Image (spheres, grey):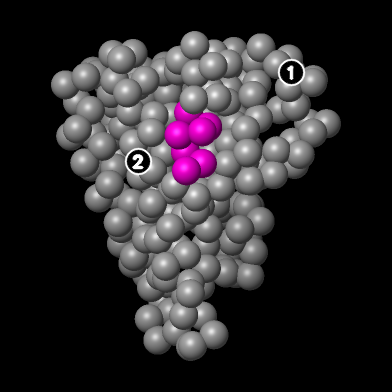
Amino acid sequence: MSGASRGIGRAIAEQALRDGHRLSLGLRNPDALRGSVLDPAIAGSDRIQLVPYDAVDPEAAPRWVEAADAAFAGFDALIHCAGILLPTPLLFSDAHAHEPELLLKVNLMGPWWLTRAAWPWLQAHGDARIQVLVSMSGKRSKGRLAGYASSKFALMGLCQTMRNEGWQSGIRVTAICPGWVNTQMVEGITDLPPEAMTQPQDLAALSSRLLELPASAVPFELAVSCLPEV
């Protein structure tokens, strides 16, 4: 699972641990979880593995997959939560010219590289799950976040082809598409009060339930919106 250092990803990882799952967590800074319930020294190294991982590095994906296999002798689920939100508009200035490419590297290519690396293990399992934190911004574009919406629309397309590619092998994919979520990432982006947003723990509960469903009942798309207009 990627993106477990904070926000939605951390809430999902903590719920998965409570549910009894063993976790391999890919993090840019594994020390960010030291002393928390997700610390292998606290939860047990037989239950949690922390691996250095940066979504912008294509070589990091196979290294992490191989480390997870070495620790747990395979795996049956992949959860993509790593992502960035930059308020890059259509008419960005020269100072922000790097942002569209960065958004695509993290939000699209990161999940692509990681899924590609993990695919042989998921396919061999025969009843695997992939969850991808997309966003409602991958379903419709509101406002002026051109870079973010473009990366998330592309990610939704990737999810659809993941589903198609893995269907016969029993791999089931769910694109989770929340609206505004009460996390540090959206601070300064919206004036919606935190209590009106979807809470990370609620998304964690949905992720937990998705992992329990049989292949015949796993939804491809899960739209979670706190207000009708978002």
**Relative to residue 205, is residue 131 drawn left or right?**
left
Q: Say which residue appears at 63% left-offset and 70% top-offset.
A: 188
Q: Identify the image quadrant of residue 189.
A: bottom right
Q: Is residue 98 above or below residue 41?
A: below
Q: Position of residue 86 (x, y in %)?
A: 52, 68
Tell me if I can see residue 58 in this picture: yes
Q: In which image quadrant can residue 101 be found?
A: bottom left
Confirm whether the magenta stretch covers residue 63.
yes
Badge 2 is on which residue? 175
Residue 188's place in the image compared with 52, above or below, is below
Give left or right: position of 175 versus 78. left
- Residue topped by disc 1: 43
Report the span colored magenta: 59-65
Circle 2 residues within 10 Å: few <14, some 14–19, many ≥20: many
For this orientation, the residue located farthest to the right is 35
Does residue 137 show up?
A: no
Name the kind of residue labelled 2 in the image.
Ala
